[in-house]
Image: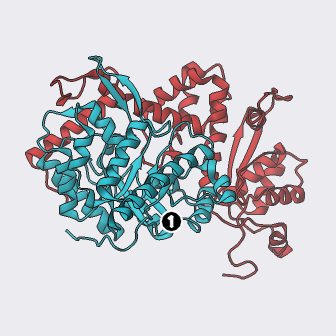
Amino acid sequence: MEPTATDETAGFRARQEQFARSLTDPAADLPAGVTTRRGVADATRFAVYRNNVTVGLVKALEKRFPVTARLVGVEFFAAMARDYMRRELPSSPILFDYGDGFADFIEAYDDAAGLPYLADVARVEAVWTRAYHAEDAPAMTAAGLGAIEPQELAGARLARHPATQLVRSPFPVGSIWAAHQKETVEPPRDWRRETVLVTRPDMQVTVCILPERDAAFAAELLAGETLGDAAGVALARDATFDFGPALVGLVSLGAFRAPTQQGKTP
Amino acid sequence: MHRFDGAAAHLPARSGLGLKPEHYQAIFDGEPDVGFFEVHAENYMGAGGPPHRWLEAIAERYPLSLHGVALSIGAARPLDKAHLARLKALVERYAPRSFSEHLAWSTHDLGFFNDLLPLPYTEETLDRVSAHVDETQQALGRRMLIENPSTYVLFEESTIDEIDFLAAVSERTGCGLLLDVNNVMVSAVNHGLDPLAYLDRFPVERVGEIHLAGYDETVDGAGERLLIDAHATAVRNDVFALYEHVLRLAGPLPTLVEWDNDVPAFDVLYAEARRVDAALAAETARRNCRAA
């Protein structure tokens, strides 16, 4: 029962549109028709709404990206977050989803070019929140893996756990993230590429740095490739790749979802 | 419009507190004597994880109030059907005793602003808001409460008084009202009105819940006192005095203390709940005494 757009509704829509546009554009005029009991508009009063919107959204990003904020400092982060907000408002009212595009924004943000690893740290933080709120599901166990017949192993595909995400970075992004969970930050000892697996087998989100020779294997499996094909890709990258420990390692991290009908054929 | 019966489920006429993640463990372990807990619906719209695990555990022990902050009932644009569906899923999952939303808007084609924005009060917006309330109640299959806003500006085009507007929405749709006493103080001071006169005119028989919170204070461009609905402190004494006035008018009602920013230790919040329960008990005693 939406009213049809009469001239009057069109007027209300247009005025709300102007109010909305003035909220995130500090250079915009005050919206028409806004007043006070004195009969004149007051910029300070309208600024309360502007401030609520800006501070609220910057805070939401700060909450989701605390290490990113710590790396650049509160003021720089707030300025960067405001720039992001002016380009991209939340597309839904689920605020913990806000910032899915923040890492890409940081990657292209000139003022942050001096910290090339910053975007990947933000990627780890973005997937952390997704893992936290992901669908609950039992993780495949070593026993579940053992239930796969040996002759079927090479052709088997493992289902990604709904919380599992991989971040592959040319920087020690897992070590940087981990170091900033503590009050005193010690810089990573080895400056090298890292692949981070984030998941939540139960109620605790886990962030693990994978052995680099297992990274391609993990990426292939999570993309839905068979164990055999994934092992082939990993071996072609690194002849020291060891299938057994790599697979058991990923399973023990809770990277995969337990099959719903374990042992049965569909 | 379909009118929903308000008698199905009620919050107890006790103190309630906003449920905050930093207090999950303290509440679960300490089982504080609180009448109900209220959550912001949007914080529980993820698929799974700790928020739902905790809410299930706490909802087993306490009555629950679901409070939406983003349905954007006062928007010129249509309601977000996906958001309504998410609300419906929460209502079905947790069977809250109450569902409430705001006389405000927060979503536009540009995106979600994460603030409760004001609207003019005209015949046209009254039709619009009533249609949105009706649509929400139909979608959720239950009666809802609509909360009076705190505002910082007025609109030249407004032709309807705020209380008349709220009463008309309630009359047309059968929805109840949520009376936020802090919002009354904030709006009254900001627009030069007498908060007691506002409360004396408010249709208290339609009120299903009361909200209390702390305001901040500044001045506007003309140096006039400007109150901000901050939810970052204890309830101010002048707001608490207004609350006691409401209790004398309306009798004991479910009363939530909101503290959403600079959230303190649970004990500090709990002390606010004790203060509310004491006021509710005093009003009950006063009424029993008068009846005897």
Chain A representation colour: red
Question: Which chain letter matches label 1?
Answer: B
Which amino acid type corresponds to the residue marked 1 in the rendered image?
A: Pro
Q: On the image, which quarter does residue A32 sit in?
A: top left
Q: Which sits in the foreground, A57 or B118?
A: B118
Instruction: Say if A48 sits above or below B114 in the image.
Output: above
Instruction: Say if B136 sits above or below B182 in the image.
Output: below
Q: How is the rendered protein coloured?
A: by chain
- Residue at image position (67%, 35%) is A121
Q: Which sits in the foreground, B95 or A98?
A: B95
On screen, residue B184 versus residue A108, left or right, reads: left
Q: On the image, which quarter does residue B89 sit in?
A: bottom left
Q: Which sits in the foreground, B225 or B274?
A: B274
Estimate the x, y position of residue A166 in percent, counting from the top left: 69, 48
On screen, residue B172 versus residue A176, left or right, reads: left
Outermost residue on the top side: it is: B222
Estimate the x, y position of residue A99 in percent, counting from the top left: 52, 39
Q: Which residue is mark 1?
A: B63
